[in-house]
């Protein structure tokens, strides 16, 4: 098994692939004005689609869910069929860096816990042209809450290649990309545990029984546990924040 296959062997078994919860999706959505029934929504980096289905429950719109991992796309399509939502949820396997859509066709872009993959500013720059004038973008991303967080935490994120910025610095990036900042909302702690870290730790413990003696795979399991430990230790200093913005 390659490290990438092993990585997905953890994530395919989780209800979500990043921190989040239905209540937070709802709360972030509540900052938007009412969206017309024929509006089109694009969910980028949708994973197995929990927030896609939450959005479908909040709106009567059509949602295009995009991820580059085909098994997630197949799972979303199968679930939509089961839920009688196949007419409203379309799942597309594509890279967020080269999205196969014409400019200006979406009223709302939604992306939970995925913009870090391409980079916050780069993602906004690449995705903004896909949104209609006066359309909206909502993303959640990791930020620091305090001016001076512990060195261990900052070094951990720097090693990941994604230095933790403050919410204000993110807002400035939004404005530099020519977007109008509307609101932000911090993901509550429950959103880290219930559907993400609790099932992740259980899956890691399960896989350790079989793969614990393989140094490469055990190191991947260690990295998941370290991530959880960083959150447990430093959750007052950082977290995920939703940013709600408009293409003026
Ligand atoms: C941290 S997960 C978040 C998933 C989901 N939004 C959630 O909150 O549960 C990031 C997702 O982005 C997908 N991904 C990674 N690189 C990608 C890329 N270049 N293009 C599209 N999706 C990508 C992964 O397969 C994964 O499902």
Image (cartoon, grey):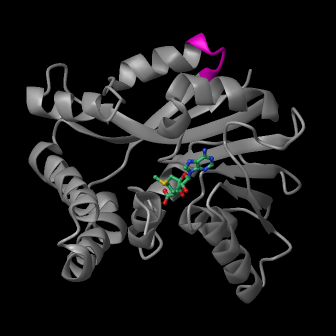
- Give the residue drawn at x 73%, y 50%: 42
- Give the residue drawn at x 25%, y 72%: 204
Residue 235 shows up from this direction? yes
Q: Could you tell me residue 186's position as x and y percent?
A: 36, 43
Depth check, front residue: 111 or 216: 216
Q: Could you tell me residue 8's position as x and y percent?
A: 46, 66
Depth check, front residue: 138 or 125: 125
Count of labels shown? Answer: 0
Hey, which residue is sitting farthest top in the picture?
Answer: 176
Q: Could you tell me residue 189's position as x and y percent?
A: 26, 55
- Give the residue drawn at x 48%, y 72%: 12
> From the image, which quarter does the C terminus lie in?
top right
Q: Left or right? Give the position of 104 relative to 184.
A: right
> From the image, which quarter does the N terminus lie in?
bottom left
Residue 30 shows up from this direction? no
Hey, which residue is sitting farthest bottom in the picture?
Answer: 82
In the image, residue 140 above or below residue 11:
above
Q: Main secondary structure of the magenta part?
A: loop
- Give the residue drawn at x 32%, y 25%: 163
Q: Could you tell me residue 102's position as x and y percent?
A: 90, 37
> Which residues, given as a range, are shown in magenta?
176-180
Q: Can residue 52 be found in the magenta stretch?
A: no
Quarter occupied by residue 185: top left
């Amino acid at each position: 098994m390659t490290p990438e296959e092993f990585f997905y062997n953890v994530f395919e078994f989780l209800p979500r692939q990043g921190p989040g919860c239905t209540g937070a999706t709802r709360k972030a959505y509540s900052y938007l004005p009412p969206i017309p029934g024929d509006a089109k929504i694009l969910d980028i980096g949708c994973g197995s689609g929990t927030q896609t289905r939450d959005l479908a429950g909040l709106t009567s719109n059509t949602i295009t869910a995009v991820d580059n991992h085909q098994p997630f796309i197949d799972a979303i399509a199968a679930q939509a069929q089961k839920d009688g939502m196949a007419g409203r949820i379309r799942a597309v396997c594509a890279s967020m860096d080269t999205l196969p859509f014409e400019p200006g066709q979406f009223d709302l872009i939604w992306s939970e816990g995925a913009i870090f993959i391409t980079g916050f500013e780069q993602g906004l720059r690449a995705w903004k042209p896909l949104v209609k004038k006066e359309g909206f973008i909502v993303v959640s991303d990791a930020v620091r809450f305090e001016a001076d967080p512990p060195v261990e935490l900052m070094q951990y994120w720097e090693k990941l290649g994604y230095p933790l910025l403050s919410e204000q610095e993110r807002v400035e990036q939004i404005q530099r990309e020519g977007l109008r900042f509307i609101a932000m909302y911090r993901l509550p702690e429950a959103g880290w545990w219930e559907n993400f870290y609790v099932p992740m730790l259980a899956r890691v413990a399960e896989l350790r029984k079989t793969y614990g003696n393989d140094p490469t795979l055990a190191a991947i399991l260690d990295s998941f546990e370290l991530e959880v430990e960083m959150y447990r230790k430093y959750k007052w200093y950082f977290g995920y924040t939703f940013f709600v913005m408009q293409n003026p």
